[in-house]
């Protein structure tokens, strides 16, 4: 590969430079990751999108202009350089570049992020902190996981369908709606694409989307964001058990893809990760409550599982677990009641192990018109707000199920990240709107 349109001769990416090129000259472009000036010798650890590589610039081996450029190439300055590949066990990766020319493309005087910079400062400077190797690794894992999710959907006959961001009614309950003015009318940011995907199953049977959802939750926990990425699927002719089978296969595929393709990134984060064995455990809500109570969690039957309850439950297993059949008052109105036990609904959450908790929520939807109207009224909602959604039950309704997978929660688990905000480039929380 060469790049000449801007006068830059770039012959290789850093990941392409190895011992097999020893003695050959290469042209590189990137940013200064580490810098040491020893007087007559300058060490530049260069990074690009693919990796890092050390270059040694000796005053007697470069021209005056290159030497001046090397002396000014501080941390995060952008440079191009040309040099000869040399094996050296002391260098990162066992090879280095003996520089022959250096060009300073963009200086970086006193880059603000230092090794001892605090978390909040790094978040304030997230637009710069993205350059860190830690963020590079986390976001590469995220990209691989999303690619795995999309790949599984596509291979298994799901059709991608895009849903609107502006909506007129709640999906998950009014308490977490972001309200806004929409040309003189009240509107909201979507909490989920579910309803629109349900409409599309009557055309394609199996559909999915990967796009943002918004929840005005004031929770300040390690697993909540106000804007998060949601991989959602809906399937005609699928019941609750079918849905759990789909989720298990999807998560397993995406996790395996990360494991196979992102070992370097996992190692950089210090994460020792093995894809969990299948099948995933399946326990009832009743069993989950018993586990939580036995671990000292203050929770009663009928409550939705709290963050702490999910944490202690997930710590009891070495793999993801489905918790199924929650009480009807704990879940949204669209979940179908269990015919054999109407006080619970046919839903399931997938909890990741290691204390992470819920990463997927889903269930079997009510497909009967009268039953859905009853649940809407039971929840104090207005039928007119769901007129078009109710239409789906009037014209050829079928049993169907669906789910939503939180991308950031899943990535946090796989990558072993301490906080969910490290699983997205620009996190949004109740206290953070910039950068």
Image (cartoon, rainbow, N blue to C red):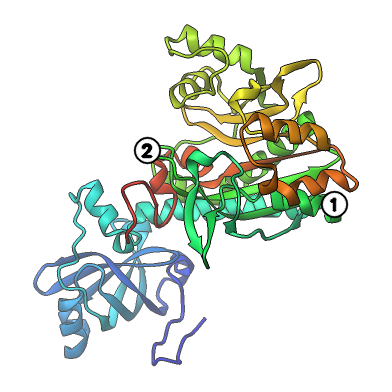
- Identify the mark nearer the N-term, 1 or 2: 1
Q: Is residue 19 above or below residue 400?
A: below
Marks 1/2: CA distance? 41 Å
Please name the residue that numbered disc 2 is placed on. Answer: 418
> Badge 2: how crowded within 10 Å, few (<14), some, or many (20+)?
few
Q: Which mark is residue 202?
A: 1
Left or right relative to 240: residue 435: left
Q: Is residue 382 above or below residue 179?
A: above
Residue 233 at x, y percent in the picture: 71, 46
Which residue sits at x=54%, y=56%?
187
Closer to the camera, 399 or 392? 392
Which residue sits at x=75%, y=29%?
336
Which residue sits at x=56%, y=13%?
301
Q: Quadrant of residue 112?
A: bottom left
Q: In the displayed image of the protein, which residue is found farthest to the top? A: 294
Residue 265 at x, y percent in the picture: 45, 50
Q: Quadrant of residue 51?
A: bottom left
Residue 66 at x, y percent in the picture: 22, 85
Closer to the camera, 359 or 166? 166
Q: Nearer the viewer, mark 1 or mark 2?
A: 1
Q: Quadrant of the C terminus?
A: bottom left
Left or right relative to 113: residue 381: right
Closer to the camera, 290 or 195? 195
Closer to the camera, 165 or 17? 165
- Can residue 27 be seen here? The reply is yes
Q: Is residue 172 above or below residue 156?
A: above
Q: Quadrant of residue 278?
A: top right
Left or right relative to 193: residue 221: left
Residue 122 at x, y percent in the picture: 26, 54
Q: Is residue 120 above or below residue 18?
A: above
Asked which secondary structure carries label 1, the reply is: helix
Asked which secondary structure carries label 2, the reply is: loop
């Amino acid at each position: 590969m060469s790049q000449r349109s801007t006068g830059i001769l770039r012959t290789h990416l850093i990941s392409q430079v190895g011992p097999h090129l020893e003695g050959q000259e290469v042209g590189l472009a990137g940013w200064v990751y580490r810098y040491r000036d020893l007087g007559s010798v300058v060490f530049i650890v260069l990074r690009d999108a693919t990796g890092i590589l050390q270059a040694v610039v000796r005053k007697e081996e470069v021209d005056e202009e290159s030497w001046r450029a090397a002396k000014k190439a501080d941390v995060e300055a952008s440079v191009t350089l040309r040099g000869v590949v040399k094996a050296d066990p002391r260098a990162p990766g066992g090879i280095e570049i003996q520089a022959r020319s250096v060009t300073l493309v963009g200086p970086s005087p006193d880059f603000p992020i230092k090794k001892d910079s605090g978390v909040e400062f790094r978040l304030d400077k997230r637009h710069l902190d993205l350059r860190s190797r830690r963020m590079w690794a986390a976001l590469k894992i995220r990209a691989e996981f999303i690619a795995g999710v999309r790949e599984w959907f596509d291979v298994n006959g799901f059709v991608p369908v895009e849903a609107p961001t502006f909506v007129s009614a709640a999906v998950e309950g009014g308490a977490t709606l972001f309200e806004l003015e929409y040309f003189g009318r009240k509107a909201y940011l979507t909490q989920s694409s579910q309803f629109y995907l349900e409409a599309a199953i009557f055309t394609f049977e199996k559909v999915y989307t990967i796009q943002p959802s918004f929840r005005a939750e004031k929770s300040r926990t390690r697993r909540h964001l106000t804007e998060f990425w949601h991989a959602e699927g809906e399937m005609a002719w699928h019941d609750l058990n079918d849905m759990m089978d789909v989720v298990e296969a999807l998560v397993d595929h995406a996790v395996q893809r990360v494991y196979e393709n992102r070992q370097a990134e996992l190692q950089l984060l210090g994460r020792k990760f093995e894809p969990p064995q299948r099948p995933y455990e399946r326990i009832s809500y009743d069993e989950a409550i018993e586990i939580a109570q036995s671990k000292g969690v203050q929770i009663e039957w009928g409550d939705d599982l709290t963050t702490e309850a999910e944490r202690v439950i997930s710590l009891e297993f070495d793999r993801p677990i489905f918790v199924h059949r929650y009480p009807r008052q704990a879940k949204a109105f669209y979940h179908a009641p269990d015919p054999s036990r109407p006080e619970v609904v046919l839903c399931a959450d997938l909890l990741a192990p290691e204390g992470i908790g819920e990463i997927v929520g889903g269930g079997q939807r009510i497909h009967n018109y009268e039953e859905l109207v009853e649940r809407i009224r039971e929840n104090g909602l207005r039928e007119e707000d769901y007129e078009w959604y109710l239409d789906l039950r009037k014209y050829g309704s079928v049993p169907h199920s669906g789910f939503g997978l939180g991308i950031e929660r899943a990535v946090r688990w796989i990558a072993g990240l301490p906080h969910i905000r490290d699983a997205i480039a620009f996190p949004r929380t109740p206290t953070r709107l910039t950068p």
